Image (tube, grey):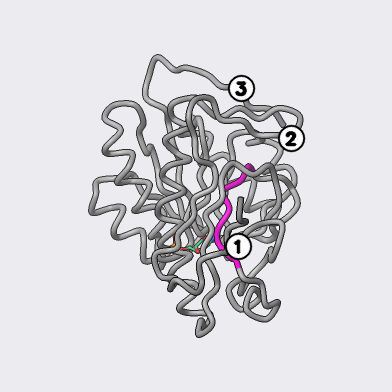
Amino acid sequence: MQSKAFSLDRPCRLVILISGRGSNMQSIFKSVAAAAQRAEIVAVLSNNPDAEGLAWAQAQGLAVETLSHRTFPNRIAFDQALQARIDAHRPDYVLLAGFMRILTEGFVQHFAGRLINIHPSLLPAFPGLNTHQQALDAGVQQHGCTIHFVTPTLDHGPIIAQGLVPVLADDDAESLGQRVLAVEHEVYPQVVNWLIDGRVQLEAGRVSVSGPASRLYVDFSAASEADVPLRRQA
Ligand code: GRF
């Protein structure tokens, strides 16, 4: 898997895949709209015809398509059909934004270096579902989200950026999840901006971003003074 920094003489073409609410899609949409002429969301695709985010995308005038996995005999058949639908839009990047499907190796290899995911934990910790509860159960003091290139292993792959929130003493999965989501909405659009500006390079499994780039976003806004980490005294 390799992805070189590049410069396009046309708008960068983005396809977004969703399965539900689509709040990350919305945050990407807003930042792409602000990136005047440098990028275009050429399609929003969902495996779930009832995904809430579809109506929002349609209302923005985006091209929306659904392809229900339930109408396919198996995972490979669905992924092949989805791949063909995506290819028809000739994307530079395919952005998974709450796309709740395990992807087959063939699909992932086909889009290698162009397939990006957001996961609500600080990977490699807590892949899979219920990440906020997993974090609370493990007693970690920091949690967050990860934007990464997708590899065939679930919730795994070269990390582009992470957003970190402290876990607070009275957190439950919902309160923690809300703060992580707010950070997701900061970090994913930032990464997409780097992608459309051709600043992200992937070589030998390591990511680099050219120019000034804060690849760790930290949100202490909800923390009290007691929650802010101690600094080592000089
Ligand atoms: C987000 O927490 C994302 O990290 C995870 O699924 C959730 C999707 O939320 N993969 P939304 O659909 O973007 O609102």
C-beta proximity under 8 Å, tags 2 and 1: no
Position above or below: 178 against 86: below
Closest to the camera, between mark 3 and mark 1, is: 1
Closer to us: 25 or 209:
209
Lateral position of residue 29 relative to residue 78, left or right: left
- Residue 131, by quadrant, is bottom right
Measure the C-alpha gap from mark 2 to mark 3. 12 Å
Mark 3 nearby-residue class (10 Å; few <14, some 14–19, many ≥20)? some
**Identity, as a three-letter code, of the amino acid under mark 3:** Lys
Closer to us: 209 or 33:
209
Q: Secondary structure at mark 1?
A: loop
Q: Residue at x 41, y 65 (%)?
A: 51
Position above or below: 61 against 4: below
Quadrant of the rendering where the N terminus is positioned? top right
Q: Secondary structure at mark 3?
A: loop
Residue 107 position, x and y percent, is 67, 43
Mark 2 nearby-residue class (10 Å; few <14, some 14–19, many ≥20)? some
First in residue order: circle 3 vs circle 1: 3
Q: Residue at x 55, y 53 (%)?
A: 118
Q: Residue at x 36, y 61 (%)?
A: 53
Q: Which residue is mark 1?
A: 121
Q: Residue at x 68, y 42 (%)?
A: 158
**Identity, as a three-letter code, of the amino acid under mark 2:** Gly
Measure the C-alpha gap from mark 2 to mark 1. 20 Å
Measure the C-alpha gap from mark 3 to mark 1. 27 Å
* Residue 143 magenta: yes
Q: Secondary structure at mark 2?
A: loop
- Cβ of mark 3 under 8 A from ligand 1: no
Residue bounds of the magenta highlight: 142-149
Residue 205's disc number:
2
Q: Which residue is mark 3?
A: 4
